[in-house]
Each structure stands twice: as C-alpha cells, then as structure tokens.
Image: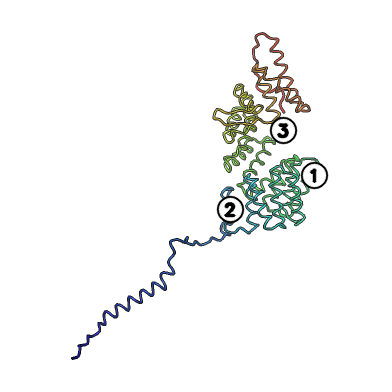
Amino acid sequence: MQRRRRRPNYFLIVVLLILIAAMLYVNQVVLPEMPSPFVPTPTATRDPESFIAEAEALFNEGKLFQSIEKYQEAVRVRTDDASTYIAMARVQVFAGQYEDALVSTENALLLNPNNSMVYAVHGWALTFLGDYIKAETALKRALELDPNNALAHAYYAELLINLGTFDDLLLAKDESNVALSLAPNTLETHRIRGLVLEVTDNREEAIREYEAAIAINANIPDLHLWLGRTYKVLGVLDKATDEYSLANSLNPSDPTPDLYTSRAYAGVGEFAKAVQFAESAVRDDPTDPYLRGNLGVMLYRNFEWSDAIDQLTFVANGGITDDGLVIEPLPLTNDAYVIEYYFTYALVLARSFRCPDVLPIAQRILTTVPNDETAVYNAQESLRICEQSLLTPSPTPTITPQATATP
C-alpha cells in the first residue's frame, strides 16, 4: 500500500520566508542602530566659533556678563585655545571681574607661554588688583615679545597712571601716543589716551578721545563714567549727569554712577538731590563704608545731622546695620574724600554737642594726616567748638550748612 502524498502549502512557505527575512533585517539592520538604554545619547558638538561670535556681539551690545558666559561655553567645547581665554579675560576686566580675568590669563599662559597678548591682559588685570610690581613685569614681557602690541602699550600707560609719579605720567603720555599710532581704531587706545589727557588736565582733548572710544563701542560703562567725570570738572553738569545715567543703565548694580552723580549735585549746592543719589549708591552696596561716608557728608550738608552721624559712625568705627549687615571701618588715609569723611564727622559731632566722641576722631586726624591743612583746620575747629560749649552753661547750637573749609 502506498501513502498518499500531501501537496505542499505554498502560501505557508511564503509567509515563513517573509517572517525569516524580517527577523534577519531587524537583527542585522534595526537593532544595531537602536541606542542602548544604558548608554547616553550622543549629541552634536557645537562649533566653538559660533559661541565666540555670540560673545563678541554681546560685548558690543554692552552685555558683558552674557558675553563672558558665551566665552565660557566656547572654552568648555575647546579647552586648548589660548586666544579664547585671552578674549574672555579682556571682557572680564571690562566687567570688573579682575580675579576671574587673572585665572583666564593664567590658563592661557599654560597653553601659550610666549603669547604677547596673554601677558598684556594678565598685566592689565594685575593693575586693577593693585599688584603693580607683577603687572609691570607682565606688561614689559608682553612688549618684549611684541614691541608693536598696541594694547600692551595702552595697558602699560594705565599702569603708569596708577603709579602716579611725574616721570610715570610723562612715560604714560608717550605710551598712549604709541598705542594710538599703532592701532588708531581700537577702543582701548582711545580710552587710555583720554585718561592720560584727563589726569594731565587736558580735559577738552580728553573728551574728544572718550567720545572716539564711545563711537567704537557705546556700551562700556566706564567710558561714560570717565566722560561724565571730565564734564563735571569742566562744570557742564547736565552732560555729566547724562553720562552717569548712561553708565548706570549699562550696569545698574554698580554704585559708582550714583556716587559720582551725588557729588556732581553737591558741587552746585543741590544737596537734596545729592542725598538721593548717595542713598541709591548705598543701596547698591550697603556694606561699603566709603559709600556710607559719602552719604554722611551729603546728609550733613543738607542739615540732616543726626542721620549724618549714623552714617559717618560706620566710617570711623564700623558697625552693624538694622538689617544685620556688618560694616568694617574705613581706615583714614591720604584719600581726599576719606579725609573729608573724617573731619566732617568731627564737625557734626561737635556741632551736635557730642564732645566726648570728638576727641578721638580729632586726634586721629591730627596724627594721621598732619600735613593736610584742611583736615587739621577742621579737626581743631571741632575741638574749639567743644571747648566753647564747656564754657557756656546752656549752649544754643548754631546750624551751619557745611564745614568751615572744604577740600
């Protein structure tokens, strides 16, 4: 007997072949392309040049802190580029981040120890930090590496101004001229040339240089501060306060524009306005005794003696504010404004008949700044007022608007 043969099921065979082909495709093609759930998904690396371009644009808009953030992103993408560190350090100096600028230039030096610009910006940051010896070493090294580095000449001129001797100022004048001749269209060269002209009392020329720098970048707060300061000395109050206002709008957290504005109004006898701006400066930095001293002087000149004493006490003795902020005392130095804070304090104490507090302040003035005639005169005047009050059983205070002599 023979078994009957079944006919093959061609449909089933085709289906099985399709399934096998699909499994092979998934195994060979799909699975290798699927990301592992335990491995981070790779992301495309952004070109650091795009970060740098954004940083430069933000700097030109006056957005210094945002510019620094973009440079930091560029550095994270490409850590071995000294030029990015240098560019970031330059903006950090303009933004007042001097310690950070120093770190940036130190990183650049590790990558390129023979780059003139690294030493130039390094020395510039050290100048603002008051380390003039190291600053001079760095700037001279920059000029050794590249005598035609215009910014190194400009930064060196700024250091020389800070050193402040007559010979230093003469050399600063030469250095600023060299910088300007090498790079006549650069922000820093016009900036430093203006500063040299300002400190050598060529203020009309200084204004032209500051305006040239502002034409290159109108969004650098310090340029408006310096231009306003120059206008103030020339007695052009409206232009001075306009420039201070611009500086304040570009960097609202900086108390300096309000400080300068308060002094500008005080210079023309508008003490109520001077008090308002002095208070605004203190709000920006409430633990700074220097700003407290300025406010105290303005309050004194506006006949607000009790409040003036409160502020000037912080200057001489330090203290804690009602908000619990600790204020360190401000040492008496040869700074003209600090001297004014101290002799104003002595006078307002004497005229408020707080004579036991007058003697230590007057003695500090007489022993610390004995060559300052104005300070000595007002210290002696405060002592004379107290001696007079001891001779008068029922003293009647005489209100006077300001110190007998002012610097």
On screen, 82 above or below 198? below
Q: Nearer the viewer, mark 3 or mark 1?
A: 3
Residue 119 location, x and y as percent? Answer: 71, 52
Type of the residue with mark 3: Asp
Q: CA distance from mark 3 to mark 1?
A: 23 Å
Type of the residue with mark 1: Leu
Q: CA distance from mark 2 to mark 3?
A: 38 Å
Q: CA distance from mark 2 to mark 1?
A: 39 Å
Q: Residue at x 59, y 35 (%)?
A: 285
Residue 130 location, x and y as percent? Answer: 71, 42
The disc, 2 or 3, on the residue closer to the chain's N-terminal end is 2
Question: Which sits in the foreground, 59 or 227?
Answer: 59
Mark 1 and mark 2 in contact (Cβ < 8 Å)? no
Which label number is shown at residue 170?
1
Question: Which sits in the foreground, 113 or 146?
Answer: 113
Which label number is shown at residue 335?
3
The disc, 2 or 1, on the residue closer to the chain's N-terminal end is 2
Say which residue label 2 marks: 72
Q: Residue at x 25, y 82 (%)?
A: 9
On screen, 249 above or below 117? above
- Name the outermost residue toward the front: 1
Query: Can you tell which quarter of the image residue 194 is in?
Result: top right
Q: Nearer the viewer, mark 2 or mark 3?
A: 2
Type of the residue with mark 2: Gln
Q: Secondary structure at mark 2?
A: helix
Q: Secondary structure at mark 1?
A: helix
